[in-house]
């Protein structure tokens, strides 16, 4: 279902003209109201009147998390707190949290964007949607909650944790849709299976997953074990929350809300724009936000854009599923390694469970990588030669993809700690030295 055909199917020339008008308004808005941006623009010699085309977005300053933390708590707000009706923030586990605010108009925009994402995933007013995201200061649960309600579907605000209770609700309430991280969806399946529940017998038919990178292997595993169609959506608190983009039934990329965001792909090392279709860092400029507009926010997410019209009829550009982040990259013995590379290899091996942990140590000045992987019970054998051969096979496949050797340790199912939020995939002891 296309929630808002006027914008989702807009002629691209008209869409680009709309983006330019909104960009010009936003630049003037922040120049007048946000001292940080006024100083940044003045330092670059840029005035709002200098924005005459969409290409001029490149003359605007980048924004990163450091700026948002340095202006904590309200230094980036463009309106008085009297006009802010909602405040959210990041966890602040690495220092001061990032605080974001919303006017009434912002909440209406946010709700419209998440309704669009939910509708594109196939949610209708007949669905019962179970929310397995944390409520509170985190934007994930709240954003999708109101979008689903806008469609007219029934919201079950179950929150995070207490997995057995989630499953009970699914059985008793006839839940048809699940909103969670992909790793938590797999954990739900695992808990249900261990309890002897046929998860495919539930009323679940679709999942809306976000909050962490996941590949096609994980999607296939979720779909198989829950008996649903799994869709991706994307967002981040710094620019709004969930609702920035989402998959349609074609599952060929996430449609961006380009009427609300200008998205660029840049070289993460130089910040220079990259040609269409090439992978790089996603940079987002908000063009309809009132309380907390941001210019050229560096997401650190690596993706590529496709502006071809989708088979679903939407003309909005699509972003490729985010598999890597520039700040998730590990450098081990001089080799760049992403956790998603490990995931892709493991999910293609029969008998390997979709749970793993990369443990990195340093011995005698040399980095050492151990990958602990869960395997099904039938993999463990009384014949030592069989176990050695299986472990060596997994190690060889990982070494081929990663470009370096790693110690592979097989562990029993359920050994690696589960999370109700984002899965923890890396334990880097080097950072603790």
Image (spheres, rainbow, N blue to C red):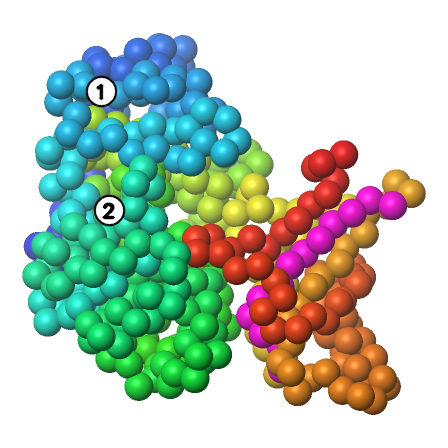
Residue beneath label 1, please? 78
| x then y, percent, for residue 52 | 23, 27
User: Which residue is nearer to you in this view: 246 or 72?
Assistant: 72
- Up the image or down, 149 lies above or below 135; here it is below
Total tally of numbered discs in the picture: 2
Residue at the image position 30 percent from the left and 11 percent from the top: 35
| x then y, percent, for residue 381 | 76, 87
- Determine whether, in the image, residue 390 is placed left or right of residue 82: right
Residue numbers of the magenta segment: 351-363
- Up the image or down, 369 lies above or below 249; here it is above
> Residue 244, which numbered label?
none
Q: Is residue 356 magenta?
A: yes
| x then y, percent, for residue 67 | 43, 22
Q: Nearer the viewer, mark 1 or mark 2?
A: 2
Residue farthest to the right? Answer: 364
Q: Quadrant of the C terminus?
A: top right
- Determine whether, in the image, residue 348 is placed left or right of residue 411: left
Residue at the image position 44 percent from the left and 18 percent from the top: 70
Quadrant housing residue 171: bottom left
From where the camera sits, is residue 85 visible?
yes
| x then y, percent, for residue 375 | 64, 76
Residue beneath label 2, please? 142
User: Which residue is nearer to you in this view: 135 or 25?
Assistant: 135
- Up the image or down, 314 lies above or below 16; here it is below
Mark 2 packing: few (<14 Cα in 10 Å), some, or many (20+)?
many
Q: Quadrant of the N terminus?
A: bottom left
Residue at the image position 17 percent from the left and 60 percent from the top: 155
User: Which residue is nearer to you in this view: 27 or 209?
Assistant: 209
- Up the image or down, 299 lies above or below 153; here it is above
Q: Is residue 49 magenta?
A: no
Mark 1 packing: few (<14 Cα in 10 Å), some, or many (20+)?
many
């Amino acid at each position: 279902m296309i929630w808002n055909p006027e914008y989702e199917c807009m002629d691209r020339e008209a869409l680009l003209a709309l983006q330019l008008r909104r960009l010009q308004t936003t630049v003037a808005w922040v120049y007048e109201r946000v001292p940080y941006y006024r100083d940044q623009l003045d330092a670059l010699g840029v005035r709002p009147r200098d924005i005459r085309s969409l290409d001029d977005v490149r003359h605007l300053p980048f924004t990163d998390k450091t700026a948002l933390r340095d202006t904590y708590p309200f230094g980036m707000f463009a309106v008085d707190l009297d006009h802010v009706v909602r405040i959210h923030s990041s966890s602040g586990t690495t220092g001061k949290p990032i605080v974001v605010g919303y006017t009434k108009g912002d909440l209406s925009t946010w709700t419209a964007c998440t309704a669009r994402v939910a509708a594109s995933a196939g949610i209708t007013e007949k669905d019962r949607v179970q929310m397995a995201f944390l409520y509170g200061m985190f934007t994930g649960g709240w954003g999708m909650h109101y979008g689903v309600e806008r469609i007219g579907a029934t919201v079950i605000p179950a929150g995070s944790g207490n997995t057995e209770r989630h499953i009970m609700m699914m059985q008793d309430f006839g839940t048809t849709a699940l909103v969670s991280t992909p790793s938590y969806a797999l954990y739900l399946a695992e808990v249900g299976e261990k309890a002897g529940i046929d998860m495919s017998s539930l009323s679940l038919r679709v999942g809306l997953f976000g909050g962490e990178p996941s590949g096609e292997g994980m999607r296939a595993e979720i779909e198989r074990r829950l008996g649903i169609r799994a869709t991706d959506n994307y967002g981040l608190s710094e620019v709004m929350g969930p609702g920035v983009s989402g998959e349609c039934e074609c599952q060929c990329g996430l449609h961006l809300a380009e009427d609300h965001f200008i998205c660029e792909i840049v070289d993460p090392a130089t910040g220079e724009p990259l040609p269409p279709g090439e992978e790089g860092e996603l940079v987002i400029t908000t063009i309809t936000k009132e309380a907390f507009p941001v210019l050229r926010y560096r997401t650190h997410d690596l993706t590529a854009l496709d502006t071809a019209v989708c088979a679903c009829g939407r003309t909005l550009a699509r972003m490729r599923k985010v598999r890597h982040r520039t700040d998730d990259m590990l450098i081990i013995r001089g080799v760049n390694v992403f956790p998603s590379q490990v995931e892709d290899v493991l999910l293609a091996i029969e008998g390997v469970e979709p749970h793993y942990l990369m443990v990195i140590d340093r011995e005698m000045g040399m980095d050492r990588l151990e990958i602990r992987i869960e395997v099904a019970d039938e993999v463990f054998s009384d014949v030592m030669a069989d176990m050695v051969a299986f472990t060596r096979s997994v190690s060889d496949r990982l070494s081929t993809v990663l470009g370096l050797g790693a110690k592979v340790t097989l562990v029993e199912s359920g050994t690696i700690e589960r999370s109700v939020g984002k899965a923890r995939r890396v334990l880097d002891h080097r950072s603790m030295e």
